[in-house]
Amino acid sequence: MNDRPLLVVDDLRVTYDTPTGIVRAVDGVSFELGREKLGIVGESGSGKSQTGRAILGLTERRGRVDAERLEFDGIDLTRAGEDTLRKIRGGRISMIMQDPKYSLNPVMTIGAQIEEAFTIHSNAGRREARTRTLEMLDAVQIRNPERVYKAYPHEVSGGMGQRVMIAMMMIPEPDIIIADEPTSALDVTVQLQVLAILDDMIARLGTGLIFISHDLSLVASFCDRVLVMYAGRVVEQRAANDLANAAHPYTRGLLDCLPRLEGGHDELPVLKRDPAWAAAVERRADSG
């Protein structure tokens, strides 16, 4: 059995030159991903989405990506040419964006978009592509695949649009899926349905998942491991079922801010940030 990780990220840094100086959006992030569900959690601006985009080479042109090691299946992603990255994106590493109405092409039918995602990474003909597309729409529990196949994105609900995005990203059967806030725009009932579909497909295909979210309780219930990011750095890494024993004050603060059905808070506490948190991570990285 090959225990080599699917993805190795070592000292990943994403920086932007701005009129007021250099912004370190991602500052020394390291982790490995196997065939598991890895959650990356943190508040807005913590660098979690920038981490996911950097892996796929989707950082904005004014940004710079550096890493000691950024490797997928033996391929150095920092040195890979555009042709190599184009084959990896979508085919071997897929990314589910936050809101389908900004990710789906409004002037193409849903069926045509999913077919394109399949044929661009395979030698399939038109008939096979149509059959596989309808099978994927059925797999994500869309009740009338034929109707949705012919529909345009504006003709489906947000929850159905997100299922379409999952079908599109899963149809090439990638090795890794990066899901960036895939359920944040959905109500709780639909959110649980979408997560169940994603979980089932990942289990059947053996795909690795990077699940990016600001919702710590959601990540803890869905993922195997959790990275907690603050100010562009990983401040804590734990098994999801061990988050109750989190040691870092930022993680503890996030946990304390969660409402509980059994009560315990007259008022939810406000997280107080300490500038020393980021400095402590920097010192620890330098000493390591």
Image (spheres, helix red, strand yellow):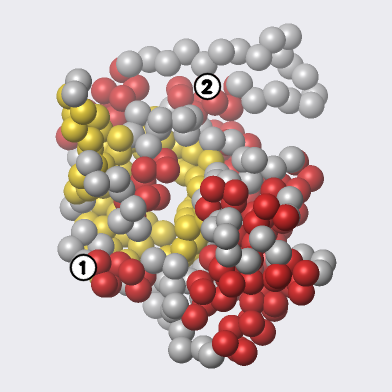
What's the residue at 58%, 27% (across, down)? Answer: 255
Label 1 Cα neighbours within 10 Å, binned few <14 / some 14-19 / many ≥20: few
Q: Which mark is residue 81?
A: 1
Q: Where's the C terminus, which quadrant?
A: top left
Which of label 1 and label 2 is nearer to you?
1
Please state the horizontal and vertical placement of residue 213, each as a whole percent of the image: 53, 41
Q: Of residues 30 and 196, which is closer to you in this image? A: 196
Amino acid on which the number 2 mark rests in the picture: Gly
142 up-or-down from 115: above or below: above
Q: Mark on residue 170?
A: none
Q: Which mark is residue 253?
A: 2
Dot 2 lies on which element? helix
When the figure is inspected, residue 66 is found, relative to residue 234, above or below; the finding is below
Q: Earlier in the sequence, mark 1 or mark 2?
A: 1
Give the spatial CA distance, label 1 vs label 2.
42 Å
Residue 239 appears in the picture as rendered: no
Give the crowd class for mark 2: few <14, some 14-19, many >=20 residues within 10 Å.
some
Circles 1, 2 touching at the beta carbon (< 8 Å): no
Query: Horizontal and vertical percent for residue 157?
Result: 73, 50
